[in-house]
Image (tube, rainbow, N blue to C red):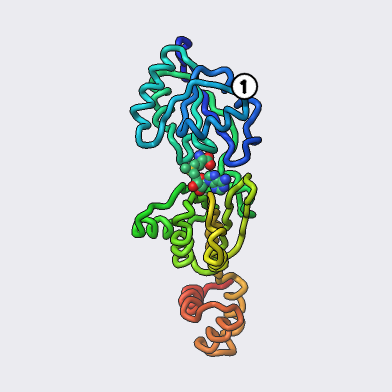
Amino acid sequence: MKKFNNKNGTLYIIPTPIGNLNDITKRAIKIFKKVDIITTENIQHTNILLKKLKIKKKMFNMQIFNEKKQSKKIIKKLKQKKNIAIVSNAGTPLINDPGYYLIKLCYLNKIKIIPLPGPCAAITALIASGMSSNKFCYEGFLPKKKKKRIKIIKKIKKETRTTILYESPKRIIKCIKDIKKIMGNKKKITLAKELTKKWEKIKKNTTKNILKWLKKNKKNRKGEITIIIKGYKKKKKKKINKKIFKLFNILKKYLKFNKLIKIISKIYKIKKNKLYKKILKYRDKKI
Ligand code: SAM
């Protein structure tokens, strides 16, 4: 068990709403009131939520580009016994948002961390996607550079679990076009747009139809979007089973080998050369 130093403050990781401000939890509000400082990606944005909750707090800014420098400053404050909450712009901190480096430093400095459950676009989109949700993988944003993006999409093509992607409205057409090109017109995807907001839209369809819908109207590609991709289903290999060998053994007395292969391959829809090789192997076996 990790021992924490009681002389330090505690870091609370607090998810915030992804659109609907009512999605803040009672526990989050209680902690916002209790902590000394709230560290956030965007002070103005977090202020909208705090104003609604009638909470005034000292805030500290931490973004991806200054994460390391700011994390060290936060650690200093925690060591001064200050209790701090980390929030992101929206949703769960650390999920494609700053915070990971700070948590790592907390472990190194034996500072206690208390995480809260709450809103996350990835999970909200997944549960609404109509796709398998027990096993999934989260890929975040695809690379902006085409070559790298294509490479990742090719990997996702063979992923058997449901995949979750974030994408910006600026790149959504390019992204879906690439997915369609690599995974095919019929690949099933779900677009979850503006979740928890007034214009929430959840569309489950093939890549071809989703692309058509996105192109049809500018409005369709506006707002925040999460993409869910159906997992890859391995094609079942047709097994040449005992029944086929038995049939072969019975008929071989009446028909020539090649003729027999032709008939059996037609009945069982197995490729002739595959059947040929297997039967040759088992020809003399008594089944
Ligand atoms: N940490 C956040 C979370 O837990 O959801 C995600 C932050 S990431 C920088 C922002 C991306 O999340 C957006 O570009 C979009 O892909 C997705 N997203 C955020 N809010 C969303 C919403 N209301 N509906 C659909 N997707 C959303």
> Residue 132: x and y, percent?
61, 52
Secondary element at image label 1: helix
> Residue 35: x and y, percent?
53, 18
**Mark 1 neighbour density, 10 Å: few (under 14) some (14–19) many (20 or more):** few
Tell me the quadrant of the picture where the C terminus can be found: bottom right
The three-letter amino acid code for the residue at tag 1 is Lys
Is residue 91 at all visible to an observer of this figure? yes
List the residue tagged with mark 1: 30
Location of residue 14 with respect to 232 vertically, above or below: above
> Residue 271: x and y, percent?
51, 79
Identify the residue at image location x=51%, y=24%. Answer: 85
Identify the residue at image location x=60%, y=34%. Answer: 118
Q: Is residue 17 left or right of residue 61?
A: right
Identify the residue at image location x=39%, y=60%. Answer: 150
The residue lying toward the viewer, choosing from 245 and 13, is 13
Location of residue 152 with respect to 246 vertically, above or below: above
Q: Quadrant of the rendered structure where residue 74 is?
A: top left
Location of residue 210 with respect to 131 vertically, above or below: below
Q: How many marks?
A: 1
Identify the residue at image location x=52%, y=65%. Answer: 215
